[in-house]
Image (cartoon, rainbow, N blue to C red):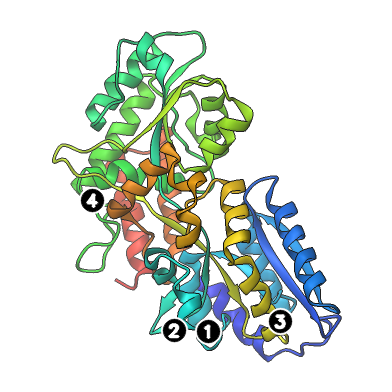
Amino acid sequence: MRRMLGIMAGAALGMSFAGSLAVAATVRVTVAEYSSKTGPYFEAAAAAFEAANPGSDIQIEVVPWDVLLQKLTTDISAGTNADLAIIGTRWLVDFVEEGIAAPLDKYMDDAFRSRFFEVFLSPSVMKGRTYGLPIAASARAMYYNKDLLQKAGFDAPPDTWEELAKTAAAVSALGDDVYGYGLQGKEIETDVYFYYAFWAYGGDLIEEDGTSGLDTEAAYAAARLYKSMIDAGATQPGVTAYTREDVQNLFKQGRVGMMITAPFLSSQIREEAPGLPYGVARIPAGPGGERGTYGVTDSIIMFENSRNKDLAWKFLDLIFTTEWRAKFTEGEGFLPVNKEVAAMPSFAENPDLKVFTALLPEARFAPVIRGWEEIAAITSNALQSIYLGEAGVEEALNAAAAKIDRVLGK
């Protein structure tokens, strides 16, 4: 990504803006598709804004997550990017260093800043300037099927990875097309699914000397654990064919004993599988008692080449009011990023969200470094080769670490 943006930035910011905005009062917004509710939410917000601001035209474009980064980079290269866009916060450092993202501080007063929890706003602050607003936030926890665990002889979810492996094997042994542990091995967050065990075994993605942590005993132990579970039939077969959504669907069908994912699965269960007997628990601990959950924020940014920054900011101000934040957060099943939203009974009294909120102190975020998407892809490819039996654990991870070190300039 960093090489691509380096080429694109000069082209995008040096090009004519002709044709990029058809109407002076138009604001174009590229949004990531979180669910079937994403488009309708933003269209409703756009309609409300247009009604309150006659002559304005808010144009919403909804893009699937798996092609969002490519879509944005292509548009930037052509000089046809929108005024606003949702991005993975982990991409922001590249956008900022290439001069693509506009700072927002001149629009933000103390009252506006105070709407947010600092833990979710701070990842978008770089060198003292704010380049994005947290549009979505989540952590990860372990969902478990109470009935399947009880049938396998367990009254409570596992608290350690060793216990999880035993529990998963027992659930898979029940037969009837059920699997103990739903393991993601395809597309977005394949690397993240590995980090849960990696962190629990004491690993760090980037070592103190600035090199990759994949060629360490913690990484080897976590990968051996997952591979042993695959080989023992404690996961669903063919894990590299399963995306996060695929594994979540298995869970909603009552066919998976345990899986790790975000708060939005709770919302999906309420709507699609209301009778499913499930619980939410902490991610298991490693041998030394360490745990690690993945903290995630997605940000909405303003592009530096936007010709309607003031109007774009007014739209941002609307969607970050309590009313519109509550609609989005509840509809998509994310953690509240606004304090007033978090205090609302529908969030404050939600038992599932309480589990996720309690995990935030131990949450780890993707490193805010250039080239992170390339590093994640290298990690995912190495894991897939291990899961498929195409390479040994140390062989695959050592090779991946060497590639990552080159990306890191080590």
- Relative to 118, is 358 above or below? above
Of mark 2 and mark 4, the one earlier in the sequence is: 2
Mark closer to the chain start, 2 or 1: 1
Disc assigned to residue 24: none
| Amino acid on which disc 2 is placed | Arg
| Pick the front one: 403 or 242 | 242
SS of the residue under disc 2 = strand
Name the residue tied to disc 3. Answer: 311
Compute the Cα span from label 1 to label 3: 15 Å
Instruction: First in sequence, mark 4 or 3: give its number.
Output: 4
Q: Nearer the viewer, mark 1 or mark 3?
A: 3
- The residue wearing badge 1 is 103
Whole-angstrom CA distance, mark 1 to mark 4, is 34 Å
Q: Is residue 257 left or right of residue 320?
A: left
Q: Give left or right: position of 324 versus 353.
A: right
Q: Which residue is mark 2?
A: 129
Q: Amino acid at mark 1?
A: Pro
